[in-house]
Amino acid sequence: MKSLHTREIELGDGGKTDLRTQFAALCYRVRQGKVQVLLITSRGAKRWIVPKGWPMDAKTPGAAAAREAWEEAGLRIARLEAAGECYASPGAATDFFYLFVGLCDLPDDITGVGGASEEGENIRSHVMSFDALLKMAEARETANAPLTFLVYWLAHHRDHLRASS
């Protein structure tokens, strides 16, 4: 049996939001031994989030997360690590998240506006040090469960990821 991360999603007659499942990737790079991450702003709330999106027919969760990184930030993920799967709040919210961390070549000029025009996206991106992001999480400023989960996952695994980059 294939794991959930490698099994293709089949939407059938349903729409992409019918599954209430999203796929997200925290994109990072290692520069001079330091981990840096890319965050994007949501359209409405203007809060920092990671590239994420709804299921895509015949794509695995990892492929969907990588596609969102491309659509929303113009990034190609070189290596994708499965970080976890969770509900934002079981019983209170029905959205289920597949969460990944992706090694990318984050160009210095990546900041700006992007997103899929056919989806009406107007997404701003920003590269920051992982240490600054960790301080935001510790100060309770990340304000969303998937990002906060990924921050602490990366904090726990960054030495391994830095060494293997």
Image: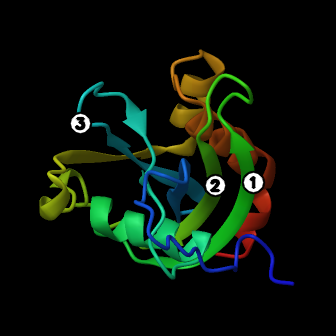
Quadrant containing the N terminus in the rendered view: bottom right
At label 3, counting other C-alpha atoms closer than 10 Å, the crowd grade (few under 14, some 14-19, many 20 or more) is few
Question: What numbered label is drawn on residue 43?
Answer: 3
Question: What numbered label is drawn on residue 99?
Answer: 2
Disc 1 target residue:
84
Residue 159 rendering spot, x and y as whole percentages = 77, 58
Quadrant containing the C terminus in the rendered view: bottom right
Residue 114 rendering spot, x and y as whole percentages = 19, 57
Nearer-the-camera pick, 110 or 88: 88
Tell me whether the residue at label 2 lies in contact with that at label 1, contact meaning CB atoms closer than 8 angstroms. Answer: yes
Residue drawn at point x = 61 percent, y = 29 percent: 93
Q: Give the amino acid type for the residue marked by disc 2 in the picture.
A: Leu
Residue 4 rendering spot, x and y as whole percentages = 75, 70
At label 1, counting other C-alpha atoms closer than 10 Å, the crowd grade (few under 14, some 14-19, many 20 or more) is some
Residue 151 rendering spot, x and y as whole percentages = 64, 41
Nearer-the-camera pick, 27 or 158: 27
Q: How many labels does the image show?
A: 3
Q: Give the amino acid type for the residue marked by disc 3 in the picture.
A: Arg
Residue 118 visible: yes
Q: Give the amino acid type for the residue marked by disc 1 in the picture.
A: Gly
| Inter-mark Cα distance, 2 to 3 | 21 Å
Dot 3: what SS? Answer: loop
